[in-house]
Structures are given as C-alpha cells and as structure tokens.
Image (cartoon, rainbow, N blue to C red):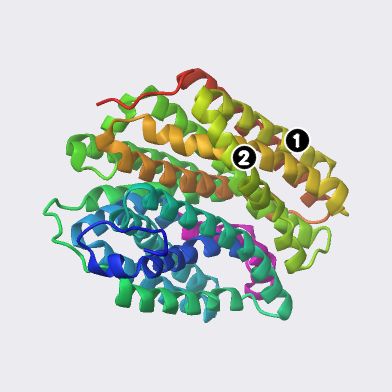
Amino acid sequence: MSTGLYPICDAPAAQRHPIAVLATTILASSLAFVDGSVVNVALAAIGRNLHAEAAGLQWVVNAYLLPLSALLLLGGAAGDHFGRRRVLLAGTALFAGASLGCALSSGLSALLASRLLQGVGAAMLVPNSLAILGQSFSGEAKGRAIGIWAAAAAALGAVGPVIGGWLVDLGSWRAIFLLNLPLAAGALGLAWRFLPQDRETGNQPLDVYGGVLATLGLAALTWALTVGSGPHGWSLNSRMCAVIAVGVLVWFIVVEGRRGDRAMMPLALFASKSLIGLTLLTLFLYGALGTLFVLLPYLLIQSAAYTGTAAGSALLPLPVVLFLCSPVAGRIAGQMGARLPLAIGSFIVAAGFLLAFRIDAGANYWTEVLPMLLVIAVGLSAAVAPLTTAVLISVDAQHTGSASGLNNAVARTGGLVGTALIGVVLAAQGRELLRAFHLAMGIGAMVCVAASLCALALLQPRPAVGRT
C-alpha cells in the first residue's frame, strides 16, 4: 500500500482504508485530550459567570476526571465484551451530547452533571480507540500508527488551551465545549463508514460491581479532599467522608482480589515490585502536574492579568520540548534501563517546581515562567517514554494490556487528587493568591522527589524482562 500502514487481518474496512481508520481513532480520542486541558484556562471566566466558589471550580475539573479515572479500565473491558466499534460510537455520541449540555448549562449544577457525562464518554472512547488501532494494524505499521496517534493526541492537547483561551477572550467560555461538536461529528461519521465491524464478542461478564465501588470510593475521597482543602478546613463531615472513602476503596480491593483475572484491576499485577513503584511514581508525578496545569493559567489570568490566549499559550513549551527530547530519552532508557531516567527526570521536574518561587505578581513570562516550564519539560522528557516502556515490561505478556490501562487510570487519578487539594489556592486573591501558589508549588516539588525515590527504591537497576 502506498500509505505504508499495513492492516492486519480480516477487517476489510481497515485493509482498504488504513488512513481513515487512523484518522477516526485520532479524532475520537482528541475529544478527551482536548477537553482535559482546555477547561483550565476558562476556570476564571466560569467562576465569574456562574458565581462559583473555589470548591465549585475544583469540581468543574474533577467532575470530568472522576469517571475517567474510575471507569477507564471498565471502558476497555466493555469494548472487549460488546464490541470496540460499538462502544467507541456510543462513547463519542455521549461525549458530544454532554458537551452540548455543558455549553447550554444555566448554572453550576447543570455544568457539573454534563462534565460527569463527558468523563463517562471519555472512559468509553479512549481505551477503545487505541484498541481498534491494535486490532487494525500489525508489525511495524502498528507501531507507526500508535506513534502517530500519540503525537496527534499530544499536539491537540497542547493546542487546546490556546484555542480555549482565544474563545474565552472572544467573550464566552461556552464556546470551548461547542468546539467538541464538529470533532465528534467527524469521528462518528468516519467510524460508521470506515471502522471494521465488531467481531464476535466475549462472554466474560463485566466487572460492573468493581467499577461502581471504584467510582463511589474516588468520589467520596475527592469530595472530602475538596472540602478539607478549602478555606474552612476539615469539618466533621469531611473527615467522616474520608473514612467512608477509604472503607469503600478497601472493599474494592477485596472484591477485585476475589474476581482474579476477571477483575477490572487484577491484583496479580501487583506481584511485580517494579509495577508498584511505577504506579506510585505515576500517581505522585501526575498529581503534581495536574495541580500545575490548573493553577498556572489561573494565576496568570487572575494575578498577572494575562489574557486567556496568553495563559493557554504559556504552556506550549512543554509539549514542544517533550516532542523533541522524548525519543532521545527512550533510546537512553533502552540502553540503561528505566530506573535512572525515571529517578533523574522526576528530580528535575521537582527542581522546575521550585523555580516557581521566582514568579511574582507581574509574572514576567520570559524571565520567570518560561525557565520553570523548560526545566519541568526536560525532566518530563526524561521520564515519559521510559515510564511507558517500563510499565509494559514489568508484568508478563498476559497482563500488559491491564498494566497499561491501570497506569493510564492512575495518572488521571493523580490529577484528580491533586486538583481536589488546591481549594485554598483558588479561594485566595491578591498577594495571598501568589503565596498560596508558591506553597502549592513547593508541595509539588516534594511530591516529585517522592516519585524519584520510588523509582530508586522499587525499580530494577537493569531493564526488566517480562515474566513468561
């Protein structure tokens, strides 16, 4: 084929139209990646328009991250059970409808409900878009297709805040949700026309009970952390909710243990000490980054009077440096193993967080904001590619899909928990906002150091060999 992408199989549509299949999965997954970043630059405008306090703004982010974190693994299993094409179409349609609901929301409660449905849709379409690529291409073509998918996702996630800021500057935060509608329409049209029909599905029942427990436990924990981190501190209700959350999550682990390999999170994965270390590293690193991606644009807009476009553009050096440096880091990790690149990379990210203390009320971009972002980007470049590889080789071949899905879910959970803890920053104003931002960045640096220590303590010093 002239495209250079050679599909596998008995999927005639994928054989005839490989580029269309690739474009479909990119468009569908771009909904989740764009929406995961574009809302951050609109938080200040949403707060003013809907009269939302700090806790409400936290939930604008977390109402989306919560179902995405809790249901990501279940969404992939649903594709295996009901058919990946079918679940992708349903998830994309749900995401589109929820995006329209966000744009038409008359108040904060309606917006949060629509954001929750967006998260459910994203949990359905993200794992199945990648799974469809896996079943449609083979050999080198599969690696090439997944690489294009990942690069496009990163690019769209980077451009999202810029476009979102521009739309907010034009006068309405609601337009950032309407942006999803043409993307969803294109994905639905291409999926209906070009994706291969679903093969015979499996008979293994879905772990719905596990999905419900994970969602309830994370929801209770998020609510407790959101209230506890707010200006009123830890009330009796928030402490009780935290205890309930821990109990539900412990019961979730018990249930998953009883289900064995039929669980959405097989506990057999954690027989690997390396995977435990990688899971903790992911939780810490992405938790710190989640707070950065919410707080930095918010600070620039509220304290330094940046426009939405300028605040969204401020983060662009991160994906650019990642794009340029990650392949080099991947090659180095292939030669020396993932342990040192992950440890050093996380430590460099911590140093970048400490540079945030140089940011003052004026937040000069070139001398204060950019140096911090460049150092963080270099550290992330050293960690991201080795992390993906290390996860896949830390378990046996039977569990690579589950391990990858788990790591993705843990990354979202890190952002969820991080956002739940920043209420005191979002509630502050003036000089107090700057001081609270500095405190959050200092805590972020310590969390990244903890991620580095997890890599040093729990990962093997040499490239691990997957067990057979």
Assign a secondary structure to mark 1. helix
Kindly report the distance in space between the C-alpha atoms of the residues bearing marks 2 and 1.
Answer: 15 Å
Residue positioned 37% across, 29% down in the render: 394
Assign a secondary structure to mark 2. helix
Residues in magenta, as a range = 40-65
279 relative position to 196: left or right: right
Q: Position of residue 38 (x, y in %)?
A: 60, 64
Residue positioned 32% across, 55% down in the render: 137
**Is residue 47 magenta-colored?**
yes
Name the image quarter holding the C terminus.
top left
Residue at the spot of label 2: 380
> Which numbered disc covers residue 458?
none
* 450 w.r.t. 200: above or below: above
Q: Position of residue 358 (x, y in %)?
A: 84, 41
Q: Position of residue 115 (x, y in %)?
A: 47, 67
- Does any portion of residue 23 appear in the rendered image? yes
User: Quarter of the image holding residue 190?
Assistant: bottom left
Which amino acid is tagged 2? Leu
Q: Main secondary structure of the magenta part?
A: helix
111 relative position to 402: left or right: right
Residue at the spot of label 1: 354
323 relative position to 22: left or right: right
Q: Position of residue 165 (x, y in %)?
A: 69, 69
- In this view, which residue lies farthest toward the left? 203
Closer-to-camera residue (381/59): 381
Residue positioned 31% across, 77% down in the render: 193
**Is residue 88 magenta-colored?**
no
Disc with the residue nearer the chain's start (2 vs 1)? 1
Which amino acid is tagged 1? Leu
